[in-house]
Image (tube, coloured by chain):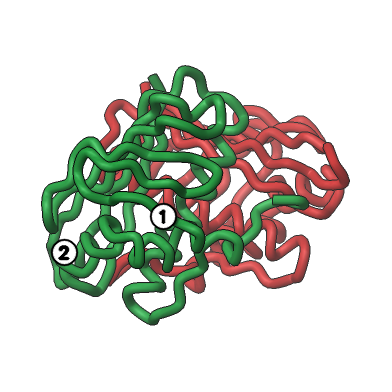
Chain colours: A green, B red
């Protein structure tokens, strides 16, 4: 099965990056402004257009979600963020897995995830995240 | 085998997008400033850090390259751009395929390809491409 893969290096500690991935306040600054819910392991986070169950959350190391509501192609897919401190930065190794097919929407989501991971980086390094609905648009009517 | 997939929609014609993908002048404005070589089907384009053989080039529709020199993990991989006009824009459906394994470098390249496809979009829509070495950096020492 095809996966969406990305990696960015952020000039901040794994602790701060983990906080941005595992708190409602953090997620609102780089992914979706209207985020609500319970970001602890076992909880469900509501991002408006989708809901993610937190299936794994290891402080300062790893976060994994499973999509329980959202776009048809996302149902049961998993999104994970692995954190690795190296060369004075925290690398975020990202994977959105368990897509059934490499549909055109998957191509779109791959590009959007890059946009949001750069938003995460900009939020932590310069307090300039661009969460939805202020995200960089990648086509007409995006 | 895992692939890197992306999609952007560009407010311009397939003809103009194809030109940016199939001429040395075009490629210099969004991917690598120092591009040289022969961009016609069967030719080899030299991007400095890698060389691509143009295995397919269908005007205004499709371009496919095969890596003949470059980073170890890129050798024999293929990069393709499919163009599709829809909803007043040209969609570029991108694939970098034939990676042997989803190595960490593949995660990095996936994020960089998103950056360069947005550079292609910005070049065509606003004359503001950011080709290497002026590309958006995604980690310390990128």
x, y percentage for residue B18?
76, 44
Q: Which residue is mark 2?
A: A14
Q: Earlier in the sequence, mark 1 or mark 2?
A: 2
The kind of secondary structure element at disc 1 is: strand
The crowd level at tag 2 (other Cα within 10 Å; few <14, some 14-19, many 20+) is: many
Q: Which residue is mark 1?
A: A36
Q: What chain does badge 1 belong to? A: A
Q: Distance of mark 1 from mark 2, alpha carbons?
A: 23 Å
Q: Quadrant for residue B39, please give it.
A: top right
Badges 1 and 2, same chain: yes
Q: Nearer the viewer, residue B134 or A18?
A: A18
x, y percentage for residue A11?
25, 74
The kind of secondary structure element at disc 2 is: helix
Q: Nearer the viewer, residue B117 or A2?
A: A2
**Could you tell me which residue is drawn at 32 percent across and 73 percent down?**
A124
Q: Quadrant for residue A95, please give it.
A: top left
Residue contact at pointers 1 and 2, CB within 8 angstroms? no
In the displayed structure, B59 sits above or below A131; it is above
**Could you tell me which residue is drawn at 29 percent across and 33 percent down?**
B102
- Residue placed furthest toward the bottom: A126
Q: What chain does badge 2 belong to? A: A
Between circles 1 and 2, the one closer to the viewer is: 1
Q: Is residue B48 visible?
A: no
The crowd level at tag 1 (other Cα within 10 Å; few <14, some 14-19, many 20+) is: some
Left or right, B106 with reference to B121: left
């Amino acid at each position: 099965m095809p996966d969406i893969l990305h990696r960015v290096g952020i000039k901040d500690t794994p602790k701060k990056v983990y906080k941005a991935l595992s708190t409602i306040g953090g997620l609102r600054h780089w992914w979706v402004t209207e985020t609500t819910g319970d970001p602890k392991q076992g909880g469900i986070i509501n991002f408006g257009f989708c809901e993610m169950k937190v299936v794994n959350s290891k402080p300062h190391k790893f976060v994994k979600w499973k999509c329980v509501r959202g776009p048809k192609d996302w149902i049961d897919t998993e999104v994970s963020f692995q954190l690795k401190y190296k060369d004075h930065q925290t690398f975020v190794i990202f994977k959105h897995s368990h897509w059934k097919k490499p549909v055109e929407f998957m191509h779109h989501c791959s590009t959007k995830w890059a946009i949001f991971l750069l938003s995460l980086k900009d939020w932590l390094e310069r307090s300039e995240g661009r969460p939805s609905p202020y995200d960089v648009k990648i086509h007409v009517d995006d």
